[in-house]
Image: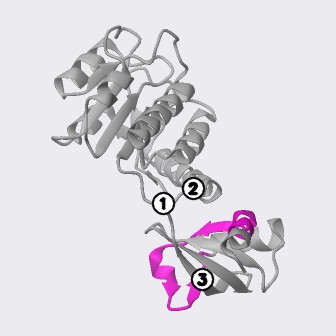
Amino acid sequence: MNDSKRMNMKKNMHRFYVPPRNIRDHLVLLPAEHGNHIKNVLRMKPGAACIVFDGTGFEYEVYLEKIYPEPEGKIINRLKTGAADKVKLTLVQGLAKGEKMDLIIQKGSEIGVDVFIPCRCERTIIKIDQAGAAKKQARWQKIAQAAAEQSHSMTVPIVEPVADFASVLRQIKPGHLALIPWEGEKSTSIKKILKNTSVDNITIFIGPEGGFSEQELATAKEAGVIPVSLGPRILRTETAGIVTAAIVRYETSVN
């Protein structure tokens, strides 16, 4: 089979993430969470081909030998995927209500966000306790994994536990670039900042529905976060992070 035909077949195959420890010689053990989906949703049978990736830059063409409850497959081909993004991108997202966070995690994962940090802010509307936060984190992690599988990402983004704004600011390391889109910033565009900097870690801060407070903005500036303009339009919280992440990915990959 020539490379062109193989690539076309690969594009049509279902794709699953497995931890590197689940790849043993020529055998792949898929997590049990995939079993029901493979059997009852995708209706795949033993002998079906799929693609597995392990988050380390490799993909594997696999023939499934066992479907349920814990799928197993035989590795037929090992493929080195394309080069990884040169910039690690973190999105600090103010907690948003309803299904907005699901959308942000899903689309951000497709775009190429590496780390999501759900953040409690002064104007956060939803109230969430520790147990509820842990359940939501687990749900968001599954959404990130599914989006990575669908979008042919090489890695699965990490969704960190819900954190307070002040604690996130303390995580910013020297030499990292941190940006906060703000409608009050008129002179410094995000494009200008990205054109004139060379870093391998960028963090984006996006406020909740009500935006960041003046005090939070001042505290962020003191921590070295740079306010930037995205243009004249006011974007919703579920739009701002996706747009900003896309801009960062474009500017840091095309230059």
Q: Any mark on residue 155, and which?
A: 1
Marks 3 and 1 sit apart, C-alpha to C-alpha, by: 19 Å
Q: The magenta stretch spans which residues?
A: 7-31
Q: How is the image coloured?
A: one colour
- Give, as a three-letter code, the residue at label 3: Asn
- Give, as a three-letter code, the residue at label 1: Thr
Query: Callout 2: helix, strand or loop?
Result: helix
User: Which residue is at a point 22% across and 21% down the rendered structure image?
Assistant: 221
Q: Where residue 58 sits in the image (x, y, percent)?
A: 49, 72
Above or below for 46 versus 140: below
Q: Where residue 168 sits in the image (x, y, percent)?
A: 29, 38
Confirm or deny contact between disc 2 and disc 1 (CB under 8 A).
yes
Instruction: Specify the quadrant that holds the N terminus.
Output: bottom right
Above or below for 47 versus 158: below
Residue matched to label 3: 77
- Give, as a three-letter code, the residue at label 2: Ala
Q: Any mark on residue 145, and which?
A: none
74 sits to left or right of 92:
right
Instruction: Specify the quadrant that holds the C terminus.
Output: top left
Q: Earlier in the sequence, mark 3 or mark 2?
A: 3
Residue 209 located within the stretch drawn in magenta: no
Query: Callout 3: helix, strand or loop?
Result: strand
Q: Any mark on residue 148, and which?
A: 2
Of marks 3 and 1, the one in the foreground: 3
179 sits to left or right of 239:
left
Q: Residues within 10 Å of mark 2 (few under 14, many from 20)?
A: many
Q: Is residue 70 visible?
A: no
